[in-house]
Image: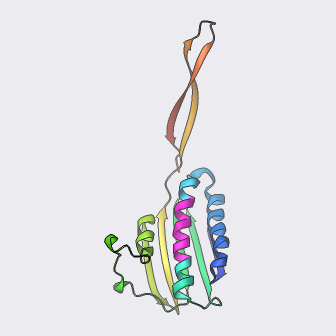
Amino acid sequence: MRTELHVPSDLKFLTVVENWLLGALELEMQNEADWSRQANRLRLVLVEAYSNVVRHAHREQPNLPVLIRLELKERDLHLEIWDHGKGYDLSTYLPPAPEDQQEGGYGWLILNRLMDRVEYRLQVNGRNCLSMEATLPQQITTEVSSVETNKSSSGEADKSSVVELSSLEG
């Protein structure tokens, strides 16, 4: 599955961007991923990346478009966010030290922790591209089956539940 979204550089469109990404993935993956867990992970990644474009790359230029591309092959996700801003030289990035308790500068760390691969290309045909990849984990399903255990004094079986965890083949 391949899809893309062209959206204005304005945080009021953040919900539109989130719904597009998560809706497309949920439709495509259906029961193959744990959406309570994956949706939160991917929402954080998208919010961080899109808001950085709006607040930094396109600072006070809401007329500049943002292009978001999504590709999903089986459980391999590839997400690109293209902007028209000045760009950011990653060679100047210094991760924040926890003891400094600074408010900003954690975006690159967050993206790298939540995704398997993160790459930033500066000025490709006049645009910058943040490219991120992750393999979504297989859904772990919970099957509940009843098992007879003891007979009560009335002769009826007491039932207890046994939970078995099994992995769906992808």
Which residue is found at the position 62% from the left and 7% from the top? 155
Task: Answer with left or right where residue 134 lies relative to residue 25.
Answer: left
Q: Is residue 152 visible?
A: yes
Task: Answer with left or right where residue 73 lies relative to residue 14.
Answer: left
Up the image or down, 124 lies above or below 72; here it is: below
Residue nearest the observer in this picture, 65 or 25: 65
Residue 112 x, y percent position in the rendering = 41, 69
Which residue is found at the position 34% from the left and 75% from the top? 100
Residue 142 x, y percent position in the rendering = 55, 39
Q: How is the image coloured?
A: rainbow
Q: Quadrant of residue 116?
A: bottom left
Residue 97 x, y percent position in the rendering = 32, 73
Q: Quadrant of the N terminus?
A: bottom right
Is 91 in the magenta?
no
Which residue is found at the position 52% from the left and 76% from the top? 49
Up the image or down, 163 lies above or below 54; here it is: above
Task: Considering the whole magenta stretch, tell me its main secondary structure.
Answer: helix
Up the image or down, 86 lies above or below 142; here it is: below
- Magenta residue span: 39-50
